[in-house]
């Protein structure tokens, strides 16, 4: 039985399904859904995708329903209408935010916050409004084909036990292969390389999470308003950096969400894992620098490669033990590609805490839902 605790509280699923969470805790977590806003970021590729359909259909099963389901959408102007119509077909208290609406860009530009965009920016736009209408915020990706409504309750359970922040973790094994490649082959060996030379609490904290790059987390409204979101793929690591400052070891937990099946990205290119690794590296290294770690950048790429080689040997043994296909040469090629991402972070372009934002959540809502001027009373 796997019951190991990390430096943060680690809540396992010991039984089948929801058997691990029962009694009063299960009832309290279920009741907390009514005071929770769920945030599900989407881009054009999620429109009517099977994975996104699954996520929304599962959210419909929640009883009671969430206080709101915010869907920050990045889509072209001619696609946002069909996207809204599709989202409106689900029996959910949905609030669609068009993240690249011209008025949203104008609000940010007027505040001096224009610049890069991506998942982090989109989630941040929803966090302020979500924290305004609910006691807790749960964030879920929309690309999990194995998503279950119970994941919301499982992430909320630690918050009902007075934790401030909860992160989901899960196995990424699909089609007889190991996935979770960016976390396994980049984040974990890079963190090992840092831990080998730096005895720092922030490094211990970041290493305590079993799937640091998972998109699923829950936070109370107080913490959600204080997240300084990186604009793109550094969101997950940046969130952990802020959670360390606000919740710390004692206020953080991670929750077993079983096994996930996700859509997959190619490795090469700016839109693939290679491009994502650059943003993850910049955020991770910025977080540790903010907390007093001074990485030796001249040797860090080589130390990362050495840690990656060690892990690949371990992954190969684990795959063989479980009868999984494994290609060490391909994994080493990925490590080599990702090593080029390791460099001192550039300027800090994170968005501010909502508590420090130069505008109100209502301003974002008005800018991100321009159609409401023409459809008075529409839910979204």
Image: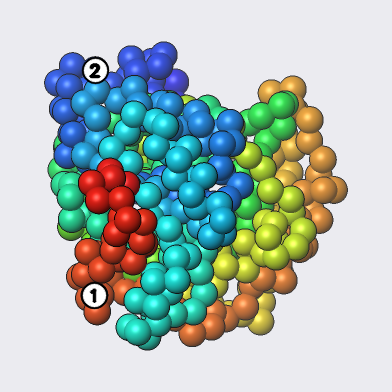
Identify the mark at residue 143; answer none if there is no mark.
none
How far across and down, in percent of the image, does residue 262 sit? 59, 37
| Visible residue check, residue 137 | no
Quarter-of-image position of residue 18:
top left
- Which residue is at a point 45% across and 50% down the rendered structure image? 41
- Which residue is at a point 49% across and 85% down the rendered structure image? 347
Q: Secondary structure at mark 2?
A: loop
Provide the residue designation for mark 2.
Answer: 22
- Residue 161 higher or lower than 18, as above or below: below
Give the number of callouts.
Answer: 2
> Residue reaching furthest front?
374
- Which-is-in-front pick, marks 2 and 1? 1
Image quarter (top left, top right, bottom left or bottom right) of the N terminus: top left
Provide the residue designation for mark 1.
Answer: 359
How far across and down, in percent of the image, does residue 209 sit? 43, 48
Residue nearer the viewer, 113 or 298: 113
- Which residue is at a point 61% across and 43% down the rendered structure image? 180
Residue nearer the viewer, 48 or 333: 48
Label 1, residues with CA under 10 Å away: few <14, some 14-19, many ≥20: some
- Residue 325 higher or lower than 16, as above or below: below
- Residue 266 higher or lower than 20, as above or below: below
Left/right of residue 256 with respect to residue 343 in the rendered view: left
| Visible residue check, residue 40 | yes
Left/right of residue 28 with respect to residue 8 in the rendered view: left
Q: Secondary structure at mark 1?
A: loop
Left/right of residue 154 with respect to residue 216 in the rendered view: left
- Which residue is at a point 79% across and 53% down the rendered structure image? 332
Residue nearer the viewer, 306 or 170: 170
Disc 2 from disc 1: Cα separation = 42 Å
- Residue 303 higher or lower than 257, as above or below: below
How far across and down, in percent of the image, does residue 279 sit? 57, 68
């Amino acid at each position: 039985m796997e019951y190991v605790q990390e430096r943060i509280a680690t809540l396992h699923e010991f039984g089948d399904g929801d058997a691990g969470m029962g009694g009063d805790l299960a009832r309290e977590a279920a009741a907390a859904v009514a005071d929770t806003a769920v945030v599900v970021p989407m881009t054009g590729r999620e429109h009517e995708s099977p994975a996104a359909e699954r996520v929304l259909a599962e959210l419909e099963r929640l009883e009671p329903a969430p206080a709101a389901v915010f869907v920050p959408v990045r889509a072209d102007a001619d696609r946002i209408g069909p996207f809204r119509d599709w989202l409106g077909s689900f029996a959910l208290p949905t609030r669609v935010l068009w993240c690249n609406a011209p008025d949203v860009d104008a609000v940010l530009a007027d505040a001096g916050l224009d610049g890069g965009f991506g998942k982090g920016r989109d989630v941040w736009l929803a966090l302020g409004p979500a924290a305004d209408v609910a006691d807790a915020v749960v964030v879920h990706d929309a690309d999990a084909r194995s998503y279950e409504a119970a994941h919301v309750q499982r992430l909320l359970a630690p918050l009902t036990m007075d934790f401030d922040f909860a992160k989901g973790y899960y196995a990424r094994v699909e089609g007889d292969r190991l996935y979770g490649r960016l976390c396994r082959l980049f984040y974990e060996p890079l963190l090992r390389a840092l831990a080998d030379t730096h005895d720092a609490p922030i490094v211990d904290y970041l290493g305590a999470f079993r799937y640091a790059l998972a998109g699923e987390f829950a936070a109370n409204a107080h913490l959600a308003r204080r997240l300084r979101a990186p604009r793109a793929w550094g969101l997950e690591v940046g969130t952990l950096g802020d959670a360390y400052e606000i919740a710390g070891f004692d206020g953080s937990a991670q929750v077993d969400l079983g096994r996930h099946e996700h859509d997959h990205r190619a490795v090469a290119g700016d839109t693939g894992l290679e491009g994502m690794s650059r943003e993850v590296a910049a955020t991770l290294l910025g977080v540790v620098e903010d907390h007093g770690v001074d990485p030796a950048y001249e040797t860090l790429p080589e130390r990362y490669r050495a840690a990656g080689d060690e892990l690949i040997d371990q992954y190969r043994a684990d795959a063989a033990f479980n009868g999984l296909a494994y290609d060490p040469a391909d994994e080493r090629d990925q490590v080599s590609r990702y090593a080029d991402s390791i460099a001192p972070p550039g300027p800090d372009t994170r968005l501010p805490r909502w508590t420090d934002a130069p505008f109100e959540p209502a301003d974002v809502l008005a800018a991100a839902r321009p159609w409401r001027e023409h459809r008075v009373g529409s839910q979204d």
